[in-house]
Amino acid sequence: MEEDDGQQRKIAGVVKWFDGSKGFGFLTDPDGGADILLHANVLRNFGQSSVAEGSHVIAIIQKTPRGMQAVEVLEITPPASEPMPAIADLCSATPEEIAQLPLLPARVKWFDKAKGFGFANIFADKADVFLHVEVLRHSGFADLAVGEAIALRVVDGRRGMMAAQILSWERAAIEARQSQPGGAAALAKLRLVAGAV
C-alpha cells in the first residue's frame, strides 16, 4: 500500500515486542506489511511506560523516511491469556470480585522486572502496595517506571496490601467515566477514594 509521507491511518496491531530500556518496540501490521515502530514517547503520551507482548493496540500510524511508525496510541488491550496463576494472596479473589474493588490512584515507588516485583504508593497513604510481575503482565504492562502514575485495585494480603489489578492512569480515568455517570465527577471520586483506604 503506497502512502505519502504525512498521511496517517488507524490500525489495530499486536505488540510483537517492546523494550522499555531501549525505548521502543514494534507492532505487527494487520495488512501484512513491515512491522510498525512504537516509540516509548508515543506510549508515554498514552500514559504507560511499557506494554506487554501480545497486547492489542489501536494506533494512528504514519509513514516516515524510516518506515511506518505509530504517532498516537488510542487503546491498549492486554493479551488474551490463561487465567492468572495462583498468587497466594489472590487465590480467594475472583476476577469479578477484583473488578468491583475501587480504583486507587498511585505512583510507582520502584519495580524490578528481573526480581519480579516492586512497590507503589497510593496517593495520600504512606503504606507500600506490593506489585507482582504476573499481575503486571495480566494487566497489559511489561514493566513500570519509577514515578509512573497508575491506578490500582488492591487486596489485603497476608503480608500487607497487594495490587490485584494495575491500570494506566488514563485507562482508569476512562473506566471511571464509563462506569459512573457524571464524567469529571467520577474522576474526582477516583482521586478521593485513596483517602478511604
Image (cartoon, rainbow, N blue to C red):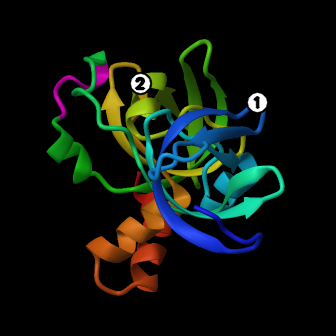
Report the residue marked by disc 2.
134
* Spot occupied by residue 180 in the image (x, y as percentages of width and height): 28, 77
**Do we see residue 195 in this rendering?**
no
Is 161 displayed left or right of 125 in the figure? left
- If the image is split into quadrants, where does the N terminus sit? bottom right
Does the stretch in magenta take in 156? no
Magenta span covers which residues?
89-93
Q: CA distance from mark 2 to mark 1?
A: 20 Å
Residue at the (68%, 54%) spot, across then down: 68
Return the x and y of residue 91 as percentages of the image width and height. 20, 23
- The answer to whether residue 50 is left or right of residue 24 is left
Q: Amino acid at mark 1?
A: Ser
Q: Position of residue 65 (x, y in %)?
A: 83, 56
Magenta-drawn stretch, dominant element (helix, strand or loop): loop
Residue 89 sits above or below residue 170 on the image: above
- Image vertical order of residue 128 relative to residue 55, above or below: above
